[in-house]
Each structure stands twice: as structure tokens, then as C-alpha cells.
Image: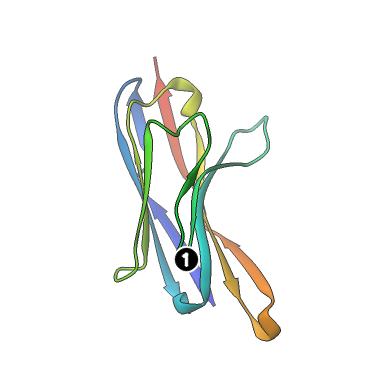
Amino acid sequence: QVRLVESGGGLVQAGDSLRLSCRASGETSRISYMGWYRQTPEEERELVAGVPTGGSAVYADSVKDRFTLSRDASKNTLTLQMDNLRTEDSAVYYCYADFFGPYGLHYEIWGQGTQVTVSS
């Protein structure tokens, strides 16, 4: 099994930066994709940034010039550097992983989430 633990959320002011980290444990060699998603109480969960194993990162248009995604395979961590934060970035941020199971089937797992609040 795979387990994801997020950290790095907090309360900041507009223009500040935060660095979110997601540490994966368990059968991490089976992971084919990892990403960060965010959700507010009123809206559906949405992609912030994600990266397939061996591929390039993709970003939501609203964060493309401000956030940077990186993956450290040796430490089994996924990091989201968030710069120039805006109030509309406020949300619960969730780490996500997609991994292989028997017969090549895919399974997914989510972290518990970490709160990011940006004040004006």
C-alpha cells in the first residue's frame, strides 16, 4: 500500500510564499503519477500541478507562472513551491498518487490535505 503525508500549509498574506511537501511511503515504486490538487468548501477539487513518472509537470493556468512542482525520487517526496500567493489560492491542498496494481490496473490514493489561507 501507498501512504501520502502532506505538510507546509499555513496562513500567509498576499504576495508571500509557501512550500508544500508530500512524502510517499510504502510501495512507492508502483507510482506512475503524482500531483497536487486543491478544494474549497463550495467547489470541486481541481488540479494545481501534476507530474507523471518520467514526464514533465503540468500546471493549472491560474498558477503556471507562480508555482513550481518538483519530485525527488530518492526521498519519495513531491514539492510545490508557491510564490506570489493570492487570496484566491486559499484552499485545502491535497497530494495525490496514481499507482499500478495487479493486471496493470490503476489505483489512486489521497493525502489528508493541508490548509493554505492567504489574506489580503
Question: Could you tell me which residue is drawn at 49 percent across and 69 percent down?
Answer: 3
Question: Could you tell me which residue is drawn at 45 percent across and 21 percent down?
Answer: 87
Would residue 77 be found to the left or right of residue 108 on screen?
left
Question: Could you tell me which residue is drawn at 42 percent across and 22 percent down?
Answer: 86
Residue 44 position in % (x across, y down): 68, 38
Residue 49 position in % (x across, y down): 49, 45
> Coloring scheme of the render?
rainbow
Instruction: Look at the numbered disc 1 and give the secondary structure of its residue.
Output: loop
Question: Could you tell me which residue is drawn at 45 percent across and 75 percent down?
Answer: 28
Q: Residues within 10 Å of mark 1 (few under 14, many from 20)?
A: some
Q: Is residue 115 above or below residue 62?
A: below
Residue 6 position in % (x across, y down): 42, 54
Residue lying farthest bottom? 102
Residue lying farthest top? 120
Label 1: which residue? 53
Would residue 103 be found to the left or right of residue 29 on screen?
right
> Total marks drawn?
1
Residue 4 position in % (x across, y down): 47, 63
Quarter that holds the C terminus: top left
Q: Between residue 33 and residue 41, name the one nearer to us.
A: 33
Would residue 46 be found to the left or right of residue 120 on screen?
right
Q: Is residue 89 above or below residue 49?
A: above
Quarter that holds the N terminus: bottom right
Can you tell which quarter of the image residue 65 is in?
top left
Q: Between residue 6 and residue 32, name the one nearer to us.
A: 32
Can you tell which quarter of the image residue 45 is in?
top right
Q: Is residue 60 above or below residue 84?
A: below
Tell me the amino acid under the disc marked 1. Answer: Thr
